[in-house]
Image (cartoon, rainbow, N blue to C red):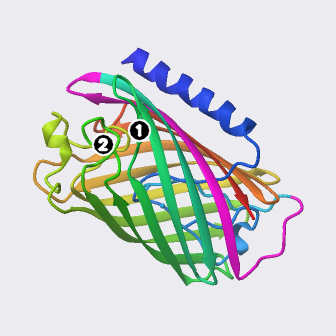
Amino acid sequence: MRRARLAAVAGALVAGVLVVAAPAPARAQHCHVGMPDAPAGEGDDAHAHQDHHAHHDHAHHGHPGPPRPAPRRWWVAGATTMVAGSGSVGGVGRDYQGVALGVRGGWRRVSGRVSVPAFRVADEGLGLGDVLTAVAADVVPGRGPWRAGVMGSASLPTGSSDAGRGMGHVMVAAGAWTRVRAGAARLDGAVVWARALGDGAEHAAHQHLAAMWPLVDPMNPEELAVDASASAEVAPGLRAGAGATYAAPLSDGGAARVLAYALAELGRGRQAYSVQLAVPAYGDPFVARATLEVAHRF
């Protein structure tokens, strides 16, 4: 177990170096719980946003760095996300590393994104993960301290479930999110329902002696997830905070889980950087997971 944690952290550090060193990188997220995405460099002034699981994405930049472009009605951003972690199958730890390339865009209060991930899983090699598509809309546009909206997403079974890189079926999610600002402080929250569809809806995990699957981003065949985080601006353009995600199974044979995470976000003009470190507080969905994301608005 200790070796698995060390492997996850070491993988995250390597991923961080690779992403920060990459020219003109971008940004993304992973899971069905999460907030919509604002265009890099525009922060909370933008009226477009979106990711549980990716679909549980938690990377939200959004505070002005000097100087920043004037807000637009439309925006397009490229994204690169690096993730490293360690999971357990049948009591055996297995580490993984991944990268996701994505495109995000928005018009007025509506935004959408497409993300294509690839993972290297120990003993299973390298291959595609499940492609994620998502759309979000602002209901309360956020001209004051409060912003809120709705979102929906779907993941496609492009990743191998046998190798732990994919779910083996289509997964859909829908929910609502909110953000409240008070000075330098910010509170984010989301409630998301997610469900497996298709012939594989019994979940590939049942064939792998695991309560949840895939290895790289485990979740139940049907669940309700609640995510909440608090953060504050600790320096110009730099935000730090912590949060937690609770997921309750809505189908037989599922497992509840609570994830605790720390986050940091940095906005610099057209670019935004975010880091998240997560560990299970209840349940055993994974040993540890670290995510680094860089985004560039065009």
- Give the magenta part as a residue range: 66-92
Disc 1 crowd, CA 10 A, few/some/many (<14, 14-19, 20+): some
Where does residue 87 sit, x and y in percent of width and height? 34, 31
| Horizontal side of residue 85 vs 199, given as left or right | right
Q: Regarding mark 2 in the picture, which secondary structure is present there?
A: loop
Quarter of the image for the C terminus: give it: bottom right
Where does residue 23 sit, x and y in percent of width and height? 76, 43
Q: Is residue 232 something that shows in the picture?
A: yes
Res 250 quadrant in image = bottom left
- Please check the rendered image and state whether residue 22 is part of the magenta-colored stretch, yes or no: no
> Which is the main secondary structure of the residues drawn in magenta?
strand
- Pick whichever of labels 1 and 2 is earlier in the sequence: 1
Q: Regarding mark 1 in the picture, which secondary structure is present there?
A: strand
Residue that extends furthest to the left in the rendered view of this protein: 252
Numbered badge on residue 127: 1
In three-dimensional space, the C-alpha distance between marks 1 and 2, rounded to whole angstroms, equals 8 Å
Name the foreground residue: 80 vs 92. Answer: 80
Residue that extends furthest to the right in the rendered view of this protein: 67
Name the foreground residue: 176 vs 119. Answer: 119
Disc 2 crowd, CA 10 A, few/some/many (<14, 14-19, 20+): some
The amino acid type found where label 2 is placed reads: Ser
What's the residue at 68%, 31% (across, down)? 17
Where does residue 284 sit, x and y in percent of width and height? 29, 35
Q: Is residue 55 something that shows in the picture?
A: no
